[in-house]
Image (tube, grey):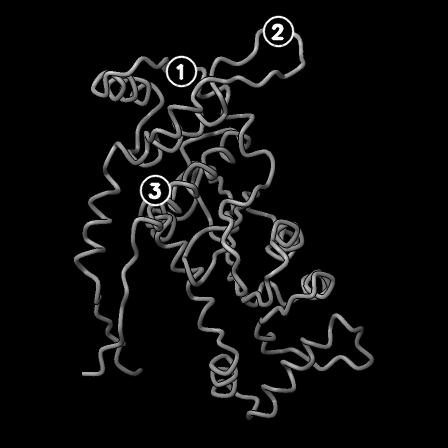
Amino acid sequence: MGEKHKYRIRNWSQYNKSLIQRGSVNIWFSDESIKSWCSIEKTGKKGRPFTYSDNAILTALIIRSVFHLPLRALEGFMISIITLMSISLPIPCYTQICKRSKLLGQEIIVLSQRKATDLVIDSTGLKVYGEGEWKVRKHGYSKRRTWRKLHLVVCPDSNEILVEILTDNNTMDCKVYPDLLTMLHNGVQRIYADGAYDTENCYKSSYEKQLSLIVPPQRKAIFHKNALPHFRERNNAYLEIIGLGGNEEARKLWKKLKGYHKRSLAETAMFRFKQLFGSNLRSRRFDTQKAEIRAKSMAMNHMTSLGMPKTVYVTT
């Protein structure tokens, strides 16, 4: 194995300031949040309308995710904030936050309006409850383990999360792919994904959206004669690898020629997500888990906008 590549951060001063800003309460409790705190929309349904807007509940969930607070401590934390800020603003109790969070995250929305031409997609597992990985490797399973699967669409240029979908752990990546495409803007040209998306369903969905799906064919892939138009891109990728030699070195060279290294930024986004918020989900209900993921994704995007490291390859 070759030596591990080394990189150096060139904008450490600015990046260091952005890391400090992530802990600033003013960022998460902004003037925009205060202005849209109370609900003014009429639902047209019977009963008393909501006192707090969806934005207020979402702000509470974001603060909870960033500062890793339980619901009761979250209520006290937010009361302390408005007291220190000397503003007159009602704070929802922890039961209201819990109940209202069920209504959030049910619809897929675009988290960023950035017009990117290239996108990267990946998924990761988040534990709801169960035994840790070390115990399972050492002694095996003895209790129930429940996981959820998080699917993210990331812009490789800005490192922002554009779309997120939470599913159960049995849902395959290729089944979620068509739903992810419905939320993308028209300017997207290429999507980079791993071998889990090397299915006819994914190529067909990309062809209908006029997108180029760049996925390395599986090692036991075969050439499909009389392939339909949506499957020709996959055949071309297979022939290109064969033309380069058909071995592992040929696959590596094909990835370099296609710019496939961008897909690693999706894995980097997953790593950052778990470093910031952990690999577990606090919520136990699936509907509230969706709201939790949305709040964490929005918080991560906001942290990204504060500043990201700019690295250069060190040749020495």
- In the rendered image, residue 167, in percent from the top left (x then y), is placed at 57, 43
The disc label shown at residue 92, or none = 1
- In the rendered image, residue 252, in percent from the top left (x then y), is placed at 47, 82
35 shown above or below 291: above
236 shown above or below 180: below
**Residue found 34% across the figure and 14% down from its top:** 89
Q: Nearer the viewer, mark 1 or mark 3?
A: 1
Residue 114 in the figure: left or right of residue 85: right
Q: CA distance from mark 1 to mark 2?
A: 19 Å
The mark that comes first in sequence, 1 or 3, is: 1
Q: Which residue is mark 3?
A: 277
- In the rendered image, residue 41, in percent from the top left (x then y), is placed at 57, 19
Q: Which amino acid, mark 2?
A: Gly
The disc label shown at residue 238, or none = none
104 shown above or below 252: above
- In the rendered image, residue 229, in percent from the top left (x then y), is placed at 78, 73
Residue 291 in the figure: left or right of residue 84: right
Label 3 sits on a secondary structure element that is helix
Q: Are marks 1 and 2 in contact (CB under 8 Å)?
A: no
The mark that comes first in sequence, 1 or 2, is: 2
Q: Which amino acid, mark 1?
A: Pro
- Where is residue 264, by image quadrant? bottom left
Q: Which amino acid, mark 3?
A: Phe
Q: Which residue is mark 2?
A: 47
